[in-house]
Image (cartoon, grey):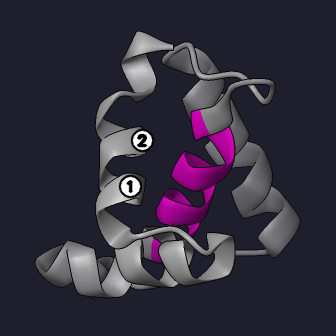
Amino acid sequence: MVTSDLSARINDVLRYVGITRNMNAYIILSQALTLIAEDEDRLRAVEKEVYTPIADKKMYEPKAVQSTIRRADAY
């Protein structure tokens, strides 16, 4: 899948569930969905394969990434 196509599809999914680009959780959710789309096996080790790489990029703790994703619907 082409990166721009993947990005557009992720944006459509997030917008469908009410997460817009101006929300804090959008970037983290977008990155998480991108990582999972690249390799679905990452779902077997979500903290190691999804939360940690995003946390490293953002200089957060993996638990902060997890918390942001869990609270995304509360924004």
Q: Which residues are magenta?
A: 25-35
Residue 44, given in percent of the width and then of the height, sits at: 13, 80
Q: CA distance from mark 1 to mark 2?
A: 6 Å
Q: Quadrant of the N terminus?
A: bottom right
Q: Residue furthest right?
A: 4
Viewer-side residue, 18 vs 56: 56
Residue 69, given in percent of the width and then of the height, sits at: 38, 42
In the figure, 35 relative to 67: above or below?
A: below
Residue at 60% in and 63% down: 31
Residue 1: mark: none
Disc 2 designates what residue? 68
Disc 1 designates what residue? 64
Instruction: Please tell me how many numbered marks the rendered image carries.
Output: 2
Q: Could you say which quadrant of the image residue 59 lies in?
A: bottom right
The overriding secondary structure of the stretch rendered in magenta is helix
**Which element type, helix, strand or loop, lies under badge 1?**
helix
